[in-house]
Structure formats: C-alpha cells, structure tokens
Image (tube, helix red, strand yellow):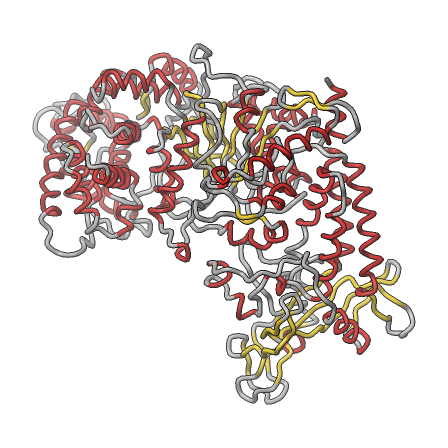
Amino acid sequence: MNDLLDNHRSGKSGPVECLGQTFASDDARREHFLNLLAEKLEDPGFRKQDGFPKGSNAAILAMSDPPYYTACPNPWLAEFVAHYGKPYDPAVKYSREPLAIDVSVGKTDAIYKAHSYHTKVPHLAIVPSILHYTQPGDVVLDGFAGSGMTGVAAHWCGTASSGYRHELEMAWKKEGRAAPKWGARRAVLNDLSPAATFIGANYNIPFDVDAFAKAGKQVLSEVEHDCGWMYETKHTDQKTIGIIEETVWSEVYSCPECAGEINFFEVYYDVEASKVRANSICPHCSAELTKKKMERIYISVPDRANSTVVSQPKRVPVQITYKIGSRKYTKKPDMDDLALIQKVSEMQVTDDVPSIEIPPMHMTHERARMDEAGVTHLNHFYLPRATQYLARLWQKIGKISDQRLRLMMRFWFDSHIINLSIQNRYRPEVSFPYNPMTGVYYIPSLISEASPFTAYANRLKRLSDTFQAFYLREANVALTTGTAALLPLPNDCVDYIFTDPPFGENIYYSDLNFLVESWHGVITDAKPEAIIDKFKKKALPEYQHLMQSCFAEYQRVLKPGRWMTVVFSNSKAAVWNAIQVALQQAGFVVAEVTALDKVQGSYRQVTSTTAVKQDLVISAYKPNGGLEDRFKKSGATPESAWDFVQTHLRHLSVTKLKDAELEFIVERDPRRIYDRLVAWFVRHGAPVPLSSDEFLSGLRSRFPERDGMVFLPDQVTEYDKKRAQTVQAPQMELFVSDERSAIDWVADFLRARPSTYQDIHPEFIRQLGAGWKKHETRPELAALLEANFLRFDGAGEVPSQIHRYLSTNYHDLRSLEKTDPRLNARAQDRWYVPDPNKAQDLEKKRERALLKEFETYKTFAGRKIKESRLEVLRAGFSAAWAAKDYATILGIAHKLPEETLQEDERLLTLYDMALTRTEDGA
C-alpha cells in the first residue's frame, strides 16, 4: 500500500487506489474522473445548483483534479465520506469539553506563507482542535475553507515533527489533559470561490515536487528568452547591460493654482527620509500643495486588448533599480529606457490576458473608484511589460500535458498576479519587495513594477523547499466549490467542523477574487455569498439568514453530540449577535466563547460583545439525538427543560485555570444557562416552559452550585478538588453595558460587601462609562436596588449576609450576636443579595413591574422609541412569544432603533422567530 501512496505522490507510473477502485496510474485515475465530470457538466440540472460558479465546461475541467477537487460542486463528496468515514453510531461513547485555541500561532510557518489569501487561520492553530475533538481517520469539515488550511492541519496530525509533538504533549500534560492521538484525519473542504478552492486543492493534493521545480525552471528560462530584452537597461557607462529589478512609476498631477504639471515622485518623495511627504510646494508657482488639492492629469492610451482608446492617469517611469552581476544600481530612466517601454506598449496583447470589463462591484465601483484610476477592464491592472510577461507564462504553463503538474504551476502563477499589477505600492520605508494593500483594490500614486523573473524564481524555490518538507503521502481531502448552504453530503456523517466564515462586511471575497478567477475563466457566483454589501442589497438581516442557512447545513451533516469551532473576527456587536442567533436557530448550542489576550498570552472568556476587539473562538455543539428524540415525545414541558440543562452542563468545561487560579466559567452562570434554554425552545418553535424565577428556583434545588456556577453532581466533586488547591474563588469579569449587566455588577459588589446606597453610588457611576448601549435607558441606582435587592432597616435580626461580612471585616463586631444593637447600628441601611427563596419573590415582583412598563411600549403612539429598557423588552417579548402574540413582537420591534434589536441576542432571536412564524402563517 505504501508503494501505491508513494506513486500517487510522485506521479510515477504504477497502480493507484482511489475510492475503492484501482487504476493503472494516477493519470488513468484522473482521466477516468475527468470524463465523468465532463458528462456531469453537460447536465443542465447539475449546473442549476445554488452557488455553481460561472465558467465554461472546459474552464472548470481545466481547474479540476477529480474526485479530490472540482471547481464546481463535487459529485464524489458523499462517496469520499462513505469510503473513508465511519457511520454515526449512537452506541459509541463520545465526550469532550470546549477547547480554546490561539488563532494567530503559526503565521510565520513556511506552509502558511506558501500562498497568500485574504484571511486564513494557520494550520498550526487548527491542529490542537482537530486532535482534541477527533480520532485518527475521522472526517473534518470546513465549509468556508478559503486556502485550505483545515485540510493541511488534518494531514499534519499524522506528519507533525517529533519536536512539535513533544511540545504539544507537554503543554496538554501541564493542563491535566490526556495525550493527543496522533494520526491523519480526512478533510472535506468547501468554498464559494473557485480561487480559494484552487489554492486549497494545491495545498492538499500530492504532486511530484521535483518535476514541479524542474518544469518551473524550464518555463522561466523559456519566458526569459522571449521577454528578457524587455527588462534590460544600460548602465551609466552606456555600454554595460543591467537587468531591471524594479521600475518606479509616478502619477502626474496638475497644480490647482498655476495648472503646472506635478510629478508626484519628484515633488513629494523625500529621498533622505525614504518616505512620501504629507504636503509639498509647487515647483512652478511655490503654492503649498496637498494631494487632495491636486487633480490627476488624464491622457488617452490605446487599449490593444480591446482595440479601443481609454482615458488613464498620466504615469511616467521615474526610477530604475537594476543589477549587474550581484551589485545593484539606481538611476533615472534615460531615452533608451523610455523607447523600450514605448516599444513594448505597442505590442499586441494575446487573449491569454483577461480583458473583460469589470462588472459593478462594491470594491471597484464604491469603496474604490477603479475608473478614476483608469481601470475599467481587467487588462488595465497591468503595465505593458507585465502584460506581455504574464501572457507568455500563462501560455507556456497551459502547454504542460500532465494535469496535476499543470495545476500546481497555475498555483505558482496565481501567487504573483496581484503583486505584478499596478496595485503594487512603492514603499521605500519598508524593505523590497513591496506589496499591494490587502483587502481592497487600490492603485497608488507611486507604483512599483517589480521584475517578474526574480519574483517567480524566488517563489518557485520557496514552494519547492516547503513542499519537500511538507510530505503529502496521499490526498486526505475532498474539495468542492459551491455554497456551504448546500453540501452534497448525507446527514450525520462528519465528526468535527472547524470554520472561519465571512463576518459582516470585513472582507468582500467575491469582489477581491474576481481578478484571479478571471485568469482561469471560472468566477464566483456571488448570489449566495454571506456578506453585508449594500451594493448587492445585502444588509445585516440578509447576512444573518444566509449564515443561518450555512449553519443549518453544518448542523445537518454533523454527527449528534459532536462539536464545531467557529472563529469570529468582527468587533461589531450587531454582527456578533447575528452569528449567535444564526448558530442557535440552526440547532447548535454555544458552550464557550474565548478570546486570546495578546498581552498576557492567555485566554479569557467573553461576557460582552461590546468589548470585543480581537479574534474570538466559539465552541458550539450539536445536541445528541437522545435529547431531540425525548423532546419530540414530551414537547415543551418543565421536564424537557431540565433535560436540556442536564445535557448542556455535561458539555461545559468543569474547571479552567489562569495563572494557577480558577476562572469563572461564564456559561455556568444561571442566567446564561437560562438564555441558552430560551434560545433552544424558541428555535424549536415552542413556548419556554419555565419563567425566569421558576428556572432559577428549580436550578438551585436540582443542581449543586459553587461560586455562582452550576454543576452536575459528578462534576462538582471534580470542581471542589480543584477549588481546594486555589487561594481565592473565581470572579466573573463584568462589562457594564445595559441594565442586566448593571444588576449583575451590583450583585457581585454586594456579595463581597453589603453596603449603603452612599457607599455603592460612586462605584456604580464609574461603571456607567463609554460602553453603555446607545439606546438603553440608564437606570437609577435607587430603583435598581429596590427592584432586585433587600435593605436591612435596622429592626430585628441582622441578615446572615451582612453579619458574615461585618464580623469578618470589623474586629470589634466579631463576637456580637445578630440581635446586638451595636451590630444593628452598623448594619442598618445596608443593601444585600437576598437568599434564594426571597430572591424568587423579588423576581416575580420585578417581572410584574417589567410587564407593566411593557404595556406603555405597546401603546406608544410615536414612530420610534428612541430609548428603552432592555429588561422590559426582554420580559415583554418573552411573554408575547409564550402567548403566541407575534404581532406584538413585530410591532414593537419596528418602533425600535435597529441597534437595540441587533445588539441583543434574545430580542433578535424572538423577533426573527416571530417573523418566521408569521410568514409561515402559524
């Protein structure tokens, strides 16, 4: 079998196995499946799938390497999982706690840097999660796979170096965790973008590295023979020929005062400081200039690819860096250099260079105006020399007969087609070579036209060295191109999901991939793209529903009781809540949200989205089949609610250590558990069978509580052991942003120190800072205390909470009885947290008051409720949901500012489900 795998990797002749079939060679395997794919592509029904990319049959076949990769929905995905995976067996015991990971680790690794993409989580950051949640041979899914790092990580689990294994095993041992089970996992990777899946395929499918290096050198030699003269320049002695490394191009502007020409490089570039000045002086009239005041000068330029004339900003070459032997020189372009550039610009452009008109997109017509930079067609992204060079390189790669080798050469080609465009910035303040601005289309005033010979030769060596070290024994992956909302997979077949989905409007993937994909002739179908994009008429609700469709598909294919890790990279609370609601309505239950503290190098749990400024890792699970089956039989009853709590607590971490001290586990907070319970019942379209006070009372009688956290009986024993080894009880990190978090802050304050109003007030005011939600009414401390806490009036016995605090902190009060007048005097007017029984009474009283105030919102006659109490809205929406009064939820929601609804998870969930039920006619 090893011989078969080695043949598959090296491309040598000899039998290979694929999906249970044996082929005479890897070429025979490829030809067989390409013929089958060609037949599929002739079927109009196959092409009608949502997310099917735009491209001819020939273009799709030219990108594909079936059955492992297709530049369209992969017809062999289900067969791949059936062949390599294990069917779901409810009898197999499986239990894991959520795992926090550092998503930034490994960004300097050679594999990570082999090919750039707009965003990607390094494979070394993904490996610990795969090891934690899976066994060797399990199937891992990433539906937003981007450049395929999840597939690389799945393979790495079986090929990691001994040094890496030792380091990870020691770290896990220190944390008290069992050693990982090493061995490769299988991966299913999907992305909507053909550019992304193409990168992922070439990262993950074996190829003959030696043949790749040899072919690359041969092609470079041939292109140099054709185009080398274009990159020659005469030394200052006018005899010696140098090889151009870089030509700097400058835009030319006009002075707003005298209309004189301003060469941006000559006027704004500070040679001594090696940077561009913020402002300068006109060399003609001495007027003070800023870039915003000046206007570009436009000239008419022949567009030979489209046989027309276009208007483009005037750009002139201003500096040439060249080499003679190993020495570098810099000079101003001379007449021969200008003549050479003119000669190249008059050459015809072949059809190999994409020259189609750029369709209307946010990134090219709104965020940046490419037409103002003279770029209306794709060929306008390239200067004449780069156009000729890339055309010939593409042609010669296309003549390679071996499809796998040709695909890898295209992978190499793609790695520089952005850097060789006019997006490449001249940035003398950083070391050469320079790079374009990421995440946008941006044409700078100073362009660095780098030598493609050097760029591609260096990349060829790096890729060859990297993939020689990263030994791909076999194709552990199957890649498909399409929407994550429609995966060609059976139910309950995937063992674990790791995913880094698009978040709001962070990155416009389909817009940014358009240039690369146009070279291949296979373009993203942007209709199902999950994004906030006004240009495509997609706002936050559309984004949320698209994400919910994708998460629902994840939930369908994931085995019951298994886990999903979601990496979140958007600091907007509204986008965060949209993701949480989408997750929960799809059927997942969130068990933990963590963020890496870059300063401390440790993880912290997230309690408030308004404070999120870094990457978050969301750990969510699909409830096991037993819970769902029992719910279907019993319906929404108190018993089914406690069944959910029992299952949920089983999935949560029992202890977490930070600096040798226990951390408060946010998801074990009673109110957070209730939020998860509400979301679960609402997702099932069922009334919540327990009110908040009934839930809190029942929780205390059914489950042990420690340090404000709820546990199962067998879990609390483990917690108590750990607690005995630490000095202090864990404290919940609170960020006060609304009434609920303000109540929690006061409760924490009073548990530690029962106090008078005068003592609390200054501290309370300090908490109501800049993080307070814009449309949330700020509560008065007196009203908040009255509704949620108890005050000792000085009569009778001093409450235990106050007595315990006073006797502990005041030496003269330690021996006094609870009825002692001296103790009463010190305890009088102190507020304290009530015991559970009295707390339930207070909760009922508070609920009645909230619903009474909600009535005023219902009768509000104005168009918009500018300020509201979130607690009132939550109570009112919950009551309306229980009464199936969806009209009230929708009516009030339409009167609220968008932020109020979008930035609260429970309101958004209830609104969204009320809208769905109304549309369904329920």
**Residue 912 position in % (x across, y down):** 27, 40
Asked where in the image residue 669 lies, by quadrant, the reply is: top left
Q: Residue at x 58, y 20 (%)?
A: 84
Q: Is residue 215 left or right of residue 304?
A: right
**Residue 585 position in % (x across, y down):** 33, 33
Which residue is more in the foreground, 593 or 315?
Answer: 315
Q: Residue at x 24, y 19 (%)?
A: 700
Asked where in the image residue 737 lies, by quadrant, the reply is: top left
Asked where in the image residue 453 lies, by quadrant, the reply is: bottom right
Compared with 390, 237 (above or below) is below
Name the residue at the top extreme.
Answer: 91
Judge whether residue 810 can be spotted in this image.
no
Q: Is residue 522 left or right of residue 411?
A: left
Q: Is residue 643 left or right of residue 261?
A: left
Which quadrant is the N terminus positioned in?
A: top right
Q: Residue at x 52, y 33 (%)?
A: 142
Total marks in image? 0
Compared with 876, 97 (above or below) is above
Which residue is more in the foreground, 217 or 837?
Answer: 217
Which quadrant is the C terminus positioned in?
A: top left
Q: Is residue 179 left or right of residue 824?
A: right
Which residue is more in the foreground, 748 or 262?
Answer: 262
Judge whether residue 83 can be spotted in this image.
yes
Compared with 388, 827 (above or below) is above
**Residue 191 position in % (x across, y down):** 52, 40
**Residue 517 position in % (x across, y down):** 59, 50
Q: Residue at x 45, y 17 (%)?
A: 95
Name the residue at the right extreme.
Answer: 239
